[in-house]
Amino acid sequence: MDSDAAEPPGLQARKKLAAMHRIQDAALDLFEERGFDDVAIETVAAAAEVSPRTVYRYFGSKEMLVIWDEEDEFTLSPLTDQFAGADPIGALREALRAGFAAMSDADLRLIRRRVALIYRHPAIEAALILHAYEKSRAIVAAVPERGDRLETQVFVHAFIGGALGAIRHWCLNGFAEHPYECIDRALTLLEHGFTDPRKRATPP
Amino acid sequence: MDSDAAEPPGLQARKKLAAMHRIQDAALDLFEERGFDDVAIETVAAAAEVSPRTVYRYFGSKEMLVIWDEEDEFTLSPLTDQFAGADPIGALREALRAGFAAMSDADLRLIRRRVALIYRHPAIEAALILHAYEKSRAIVAAVPERGDRLETQVFVHAFIGGALGAIRHWCLNGFAEHPYECIDRALTLLEHGFTDPRKRATPP
DNA sequence: TGCCCTCTGGCAGTGACTGCCTATACTGAA
DNA sequence: TTCAGTATAGGCAGTCACTGCCAGAGGGCA
């Protein structure tokens, strides 16, 4: 594991981060232009002027070129703590609200670009789902006394599922609403349960 | 698509089904013995006395050798209808109860064998998750007036997530409980929501 | 400046997966 | 029973994602 405390950036790490952004940019361009399946890693590497080996070292898989988000670690790790608290849904809502509030318009544009690509290509959507479940597994593991309890498993998985459903809806709806709006409504649904079909049938 | 009505079995289809069972059996044996990653498709094909090409034609992917369940189509397609009704959770509960009740001990043993393998190898668990989400996508698509609604997306995804959590807990708990027990409790959690942490902290 | 060491690049390999074509087995009618 | 017509399995060769391994280039620090 890296380390939990934020260390001074490191001049070498900056180059890596810059390269990752350059590679992701090139990849998004190519994928949007020719389609995900018709672009080889070698092509992406050539466009970003790095070796294919480096692309794999940085991103691990082709799909991660689209999934990867620099802020991922920062936004997701506090989530772990929320699940242990007394009001996990409220805490999650607040954490996500803060996360979206901290985003610039450029950030949001980049996310929309990536999400559009994700739901245009099933293979990438698959990778996103797996990525989300890896997170959920980490979250469950981080709640020691409750990790093996069915209730924890179901809650965490349902939350991940709900979040994925919200993102999917956000994209399939042409990004009409603000993403936090979707997440928020998903959280409300999880909060109150699906007992009453009218809760599902009529928006708040 | 095949067809929705049950046609006479077809003598050719029987041979295929028998071959699939033979291939899956051989695959499970080999995966349990040597591990999923250390068995090539070629080996499985040789053990089942079919060509590797046929294995792919039947199962589509290596992971599907473990995931595949003959009853899958039969148990899952009625689920689609349940989501459209007034009391989807109740209908789901009943459908799943009936499904498990119809299972023989041999069926259950096979499922335990497959699930144990699934959670021993992340790659197979990944495939299971994706398989489940493909089903959920089909389900959402089958609820025409509600398919693009956020509430439907979230509900279906949360249900799938909850079910996956329940199965995961079932396996990680050493198959101590009956699987329907786990699913049932998961449904109850979804039904009542996660408002009250005590609902998560204390079993019914 | 010089030593250490991490990181990048190239190489070669593995194995999952996929068209394409031929042989073969099944199906339905003469 | 036999003969078309059709669907299906096998074999071949190819693509490409992904992975160790090793040598070289470049930062980090004295």
Image: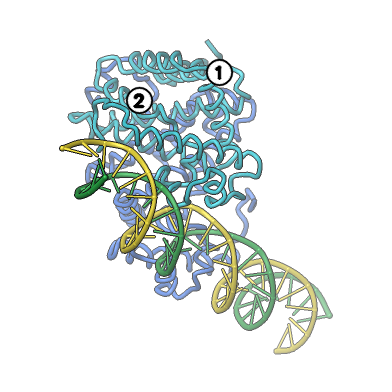
Chain colours: A cyan, B blue, C green, D yellow
Image coordinates of residue B29 in percent, x first then y, are: 32, 65
| Location of residue B97 in the rendering, given as x and y in whole percent from the top left corner | 39, 39
The image quarter containing residue A14 is top left
Q: Residue A39 vs residue B29: left or right?
A: right
**The disc labelled 2 sits on which kind of residue?**
Phe
Say if A177 sits above or below B188 in the image: above
Residue nearest the viewer, comparing A185 with A95: A95
Image coordinates of residue B197 in percent, x first then y, are 27, 17
Query: Residue type at mark 1?
Result: Ala
Q: Mark 2 or mark 1, which is nearer to you?
A: 2
Q: Secondary structure at mark 2?
A: helix
* Residue plotted at (40% across, 14% down): A98
User: Considering depth in this image, is A146 or A178 the residue closer to the camera?
Assistant: A178
Q: Residue at x 28, y 28 (%)?
A: A151
Quadrant containing the N terminus of chain A in the rendered view: top left
In the rendered view, tell whether residue A162 sits above or below residue B126.
above
Element under disc 1:
helix
Residue labelled with disc 1: A201
Does the image show residue B101? no
Identify the residue under disc 2.
A74
Residue B5 shown left or right of residue B127 in the figure: right
Q: Chain of mark 2?
A: A
- Residue B143 makes an appearance in the image: yes
Compared with D13, A99 (above or below) is above
| Place of residue A129 in the rendered image (x, y in percent of width and height, measured from the top left) | 45, 37
Badge 2 vs badge 1, beta-carbon distance below 8 Å: no
View extreme (top): residue: A204
Q: Earlier in the sequence, mark 2 or mark 1?
A: 2
